[in-house]
Image: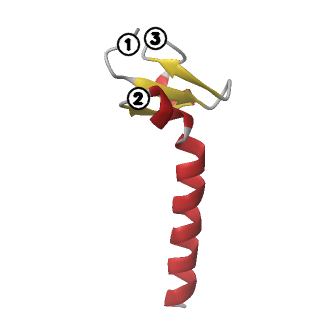
Amino acid sequence: MSDGQWWFCLKHMRVEPEQGCPNKDRMGPYASEQEAAGALQRAAERNKAWDEADADEE
C-alpha cells in the first residue's frame, strides 16, 4: 500500500494513500488510514476548543 502517508481528501471526502489528489485539496499526512479518517472530527474538536478559549479571554 503506502509507506505510512495517508491523507483525507476534502474534494472527495475520503481517505487516500500518498498517490491521490493534489495536497491543496487534502489534510495530512497522517501515519495511518484510521488517523486520516478522523481528520475532520479532530479539526472540528480543535476549532470548538479554540472558540471556547477565545470566548474565555473576552
Of 9 and 30, the residue lying toward us: 30
Q: Amino acid at mark 2?
A: Ser
Q: Residue furthest bottom?
A: 58
Residue 27 is at least partly visible in this image = no
Q: Which quadrant of the view contains residue 19?
A: top left
Residue pointed to by mark 1: 2
Residue pointed to by mark 2: 32
SS class, disc 1: loop
Residue 14: x percent and y percent? 63, 25
Mark 2 vs mark 1: which is more N-terminal?
A: 1
Residue 13: x percent and y percent? 67, 29
Residue 19's label in the rendered image is 3
Q: Amino acid at mark 1?
A: Ser
Of 34 and 45, the residue lying toward us: 34
For residue 45, above or below residue 49: above
Q: Residue at coordinates 58% horizontally, 84% vertically from top-left?
A: 55
Q: If the image is split into quadrants, where does the N terminus sit?
A: top left
Q: Residue at coordinates 51% horizontally, 60% vertically from top-left?
A: 46
Residue 18: x percent and y percent? 42, 16
For residue 2, above or below residue 49: above
**Does 6 sit left or right of 26 as displayed?**
left
